[in-house]
């Protein structure tokens, strides 16, 4: 059967069912063609992620794994009809031209996007639905960056004539003139007779007069209202209203202020288009604190409920913008930033920095900060700020949920570049330490960094850490000192993995025992060897041979330098305890085969079936007689002898060598016979029927069965492979259950419950962050000595700590096909966070680096529909408040410590602050933790 062409489609009635391989090839070809020729206005269709995953598994496109490893899924049956019903809102009107989506959907978790041609093909094959299409829009024509407008802008149109309400859906990238055209089409009115107003919060904020700007640039947000005004005899109702009142605050002025300054002391930027911000700045940069800002329909002289408390203003949620609101509230309650932006900061605006935003982001942030710190508690819509942010960071445009930490990182970096005091960055060559003292080299690196980066953000938020790399081959050491803006601390369970390995005795001393140990995810097998050695109390004369068992045979052995990433959670690992120096002996592998005594020899390859786990032992290279082999196997089988077996005189073995006659089992199943010396074994071999088991020479897959020679058995290589027959007689003597059902390396269900229950300490997160660990396989280091990429070990140390310490708790873990959130409670100090143990260098004399918490960003729920909020402390008041979008409430200090904490904000206390805080209760359990 030929693969369907990507150029056209056969009628559904004429299509024969395709194979999984044909479906896969057709979809891949159509997708490649669509992505290569994407253009503005193309359609993409939403497909339920659960259905898409089933289809991918069916056609062999999907692999899945834990711990960042891929495990091929078993082929599944053909999926049923496409079912997109869970994506559509229950309130969706039947027969609607465009399906209304649930508001909390996330790409890759709830849905996937496929080209129109792929959707048609999938629908021909499977039917179902409903069909949900969205347009492709060009985000940046210069770089040809396209995005899919999954959530179009919903606007509420209010007709001033009869107060009727309609919902309009348009792309946020649509022009204002398209909005006018759509309104005229719906209401059958002439465009010359209508005006549209930004009617946010039932207030005429501004007329939508610039028809060439996009709706996003016009600061129209999801679900907001616009007002339709229709002229009567070329007279507008707003003109009449303006003439009929003397109230200056009745309407916001229709034209922008003619002043060269906004309330933040910076320039007014019309619609976010200004590219020459410096042209409007007077030479003296005079600052007028009495100018009021009317943007967003909000005045500093708000006529809402007022009191003397400042900084308790909420932020409107503009549509999934809680991630942005929480980050803003934490920053605007950072004392150094409040002090900085409430003063005249305009002299430090850098309009020449190509890496910056020409000052626009700093001005927008400053204006918003001033609104939030004005008197009163009237919540503020951050529309202007979001508009500026979206222009310079398209990833935050639209109304999807985003990561608050990612926004915070961008915002701090953007503010730094906008306020960088260095106008022309000098070229500085990267230098090596050249065995100089750390203090000297670190100071040089910091000065070089400050020569190119000097702003309020660097002054307050940036620290310096020391990074040490060591080559595992030549021991070359590389030291660098780099700046940091925040600390991203892994939770201990995200940097380690639990691994279960079954340990066998290669000398017949004990029964197999599974051990579960914890190792670094990015580690090597040497780390696993060490953890297992400690767990099973290995002595100096013993070592471990690690192997993977697959299909009842040894699939591979692991070397100490092999990456743990190569071991999957569903693998079954065994470790054989052998004497040190076993490499010089002949390794003996023993496979087990279930056999019927009455099966004729020609039927061997038909009836064979491997069972149990392979056993491994060793014998001297020159001791390959049949009696030597049987003696060694008899010794390693000793722990499996059933307790009811009594010594008998018909054994083939006697004398001082290992034999069934000499085996005595202890309470724990261990044999008192040790070693495998066969020097005194009687060479006399009795009748074959009296042998305790049957052995044959075989290959690594157990496909060959050759008889063992009486005198000498030559093998190629360093491994002899044996096949042991298991009939009723062997089962009566030995207990095979100890060799069956090997545990998997990891059981995900057990771990997921554990991570929810366990609690960790902030200091344990710091220890995990600063722990010496090998680099990942995708992050190899080029060793200048070896001239090759090596998996070097990396060690981080905190060298210079900033005044404002931001701590990011990495709760979200990502692998190629799986995302997970850890709800582990992290116990962190509110007062007296002593970083003395971690600070390798201080620049403030003898004052210890003591920090106090002043803000927390929380994340509630899962990855798909989570919510962000912030706790912030008014430092002068010494009171805590909860900022949940527009809702602000007082909270107790202890309520800020929850399992939802995602970002922690600490401020460093100086000597006076430390003295003042002597009466503050100290978290003694946290203070003592670093010394543990």
Image (tube, rainbow, N blue to C red):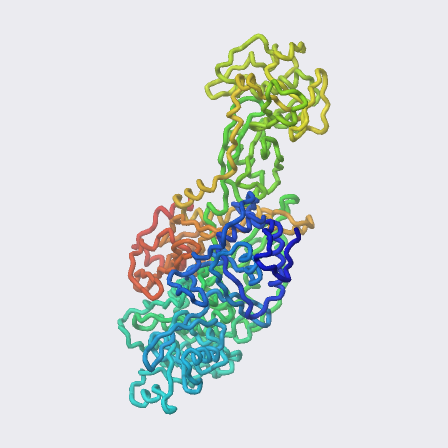
Query: Residue 466 at x, y = what percent?
Result: 54, 53
Can you say whether 556 is above or below 906 in the image? above
Q: Is residue 542 left or right of residue 883?
A: right
- The reply to whether residue 15 is in sight is yes
Query: Residue 394 at x, y = what percent?
Result: 51, 67
Q: Is residue 701 left or right of residue 673?
A: right
Query: Residue 90 at x, y = what percent?
Result: 38, 60
Residue at 59% in and 49% down: 20
User: Residue extending furthest front?
Assistant: 13
Q: Quadrant of residue 310?
A: bottom left
Can you say whether 380 is above or below 659 in the image? below
Q: Nearer the viewer, residue 7 or 244?
A: 7
Can you say whether 821 is above or below 243 in the image? above
| Quarter of the picture holding the C terminus | top left
Q: Is residue 443 left or right of residue 369?
A: right
Q: Nearer the viewer, residue 634 or 410?
A: 634
Label count reads 0
Q: Quadrant of residue 803?
A: bottom left
Q: Nearer the viewer, residue 284 or 570?
A: 570
Can you say whether 187 is above or below 825 in the image? below
Residue at 44% in and 73% down: 364
Query: Residue 56 at x, y = what percent?
Result: 55, 51
- The reply to whether residue 772 is in sight is no
Q: Is residue 692 left or right of residue 333?
A: right
User: Residue extending furthest bottom?
Assistant: 233
């Amino acid at each position: 059967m030929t693969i369907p062409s990507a150029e056209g489609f056969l009628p559904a009635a004429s299509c024969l069912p395709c194979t999984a391989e044909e479906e896969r090839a057709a979809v891949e070809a159509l997708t490649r063609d669509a992505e290569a020729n994407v253009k503005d206005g193309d359609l993409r269709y939403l497909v339920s992620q659960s259905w898409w995953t089933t289809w991918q598994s069916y056609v062999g496109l999907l692999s899945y794994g834990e711990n960042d490893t891929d495990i091929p899924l078993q082929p599944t049956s053909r999926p049923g009809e496409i079912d997109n019903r869970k994506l559509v809102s229950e309130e969706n009107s039947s027969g609607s031209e465009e399906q209304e989506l649930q508001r909390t959907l996330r790409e890759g978790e709830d849905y996937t996007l496929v080209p129109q041609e792929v959707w048609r093909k999938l629908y021909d094959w499977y039917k179902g639905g409903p069909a949900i299409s969205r347009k492709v829009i060009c985000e940046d024509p210069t770089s040809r960056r396209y995005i899919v407008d999954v959530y179009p802008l919903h606007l509420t149109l209010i007709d001033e004539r009869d107060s009727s309400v309609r919902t309009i859906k348009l792309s946020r990238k649509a022009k204002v003139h398209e909005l006018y055209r759509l309104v005229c089409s719906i209401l059958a009115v002439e465009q010359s007779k209508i005006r549209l107003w930004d009617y946010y919060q039932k207030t005429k904020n501004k007329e939508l007069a610039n028809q060439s700007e996009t709706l996003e640039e016009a600061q129209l947000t999801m679900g907001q209202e616009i007002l339709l005004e229709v002229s009567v005899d070329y007279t507008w109702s707003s003109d009449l209203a303006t003439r009929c009142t003397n109230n200056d605050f009745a309407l916001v002025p229709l034209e922008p202020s003619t002043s060269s300054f906004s309330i933040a002391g910076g320039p007014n930027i019309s619609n976010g288009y200004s590219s020459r911000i410096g042209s409007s700045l007077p030479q003296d940069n005079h600052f007028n604190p009495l100018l009021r800002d009317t943007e967003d329909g909000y005045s500093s002289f708000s006529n809402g409920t007022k009191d003397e408390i400042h900084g308790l203003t909420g932020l409107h949620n503009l549509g999934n913008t809680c991630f942005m609101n929480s980050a803003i509230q934490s920053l605007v309650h950072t004392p150094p930033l409040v002090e900085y932006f409430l003063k005249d900061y305009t002299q430090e605006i850098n309009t020449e920095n190509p890496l910056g935003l020409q000052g626009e982001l700093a001005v927008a942030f400053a204006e918003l900060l001033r609104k939030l710190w004005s008197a009163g508690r009237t919540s503020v819509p951050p529309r202007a700020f979001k508009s500026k942010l979206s222009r310079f960071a398209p990833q935050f445009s639209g109304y999807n949920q985003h990561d608050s930490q990612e926004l915070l990182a961008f915002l701090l970096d953007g503010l730094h570049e906008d306020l960088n005091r260095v106008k022309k960055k000098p070229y500085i060559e990267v230098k090596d330490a050249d065995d100089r003292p750390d203090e000297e080299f670190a100071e040089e690196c910091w000065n070089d960094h400050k020569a190119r980066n000097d702003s309020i953000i660097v002054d307050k938020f940036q620290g310096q850490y020391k990074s040490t790399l060591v080559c595992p081959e030549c021991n070359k050491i590389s030291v660098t000192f780099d700046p940091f803006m925040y600390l991203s601390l892994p939770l201990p369970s995200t940097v380690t993995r639990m691994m279960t390995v079954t340990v066998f005795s290669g000398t017949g001393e004990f029964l197999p025992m599974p051990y579960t140990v914890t190792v670094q995810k990015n580690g090597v097998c040497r780390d696993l060897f060490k953890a297992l050695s400690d767990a099973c109390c290995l002595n100096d004369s013993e070592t471990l041979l690690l192997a993977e068992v697959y299909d009842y045979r040894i699939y591979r052995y692991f070397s100490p330098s092999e990456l743990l990433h190569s071991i999957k959670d569903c693998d079954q690992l065994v470790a054989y305890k052998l004497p040190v120096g076993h490499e010089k002996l002949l390794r003996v592998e023993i496979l087990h085969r279930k056999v019927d005594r009455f099966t004729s020899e020609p039927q061997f390859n038909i009836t064979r079936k491997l069972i149990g786990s392979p056993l491994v032992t060793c014998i001297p290279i020159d001791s390959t007689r049949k009696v030597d082999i049987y003696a060694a196997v008899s010794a390693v089988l000793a722990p499996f002898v059933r307790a009811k077996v009594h010594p008998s005189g018909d054994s083939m073995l006697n004398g001082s060598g290992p034999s069934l006659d000499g085996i005595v089992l202890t309470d724990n199943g261990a044999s008192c016979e040790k070693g495998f010396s066969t020097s005194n074994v009687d060479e006399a071999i009795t009748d074959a029927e009296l042998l305790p088991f049957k052995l044959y020479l075989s290959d690594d897959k157990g496909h060959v069965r050759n008889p063992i020679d009486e005198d000498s058995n030559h093998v190629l290589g360093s491994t002899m492979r044996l096949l042991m027959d298991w009939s009723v007689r062997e089962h009566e003597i030995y207990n095979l259950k100890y060799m069956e059902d090997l545990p998997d390396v990891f059981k995900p269900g057990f771990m997921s419950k554990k991570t929810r229950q366990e609690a960790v300490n902030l200091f344990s997160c710091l220890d995990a962050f600063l722990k010496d660990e090998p680099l990942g396989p995708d992050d190899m280091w080029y060793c200048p000595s070896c001239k090759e990429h090596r998996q070097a070990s990396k060690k981080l140390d905190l060298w210079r700590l900033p005044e404002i310490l931001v701590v990011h708790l990495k709760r979200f873990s990502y692998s190629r096909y799986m995302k997970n959130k850890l709800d582990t409670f992290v116990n962190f100090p509110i007062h007296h966070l002593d970083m003395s143990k971690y600070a390798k260098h201080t620049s403030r004399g003898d004052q210890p680096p003591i920090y106090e918490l002043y803000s927390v960003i929380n994340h509630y729920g899962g990855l798909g529909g989570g919510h962000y909020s912030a706790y912030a402390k008014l430092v002068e008041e010494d009171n805590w408040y909860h900022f949940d979008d527009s809702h602000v409430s007082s909270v107790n200090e202890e309520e800020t410590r929850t399992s939802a904490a995602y970002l922690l904000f600490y401020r460093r206390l100086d000597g006076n602050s430390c003295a003042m805080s002597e009466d503050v209760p100290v978290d003694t359990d946290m203070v003592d933790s670093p010394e543990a």
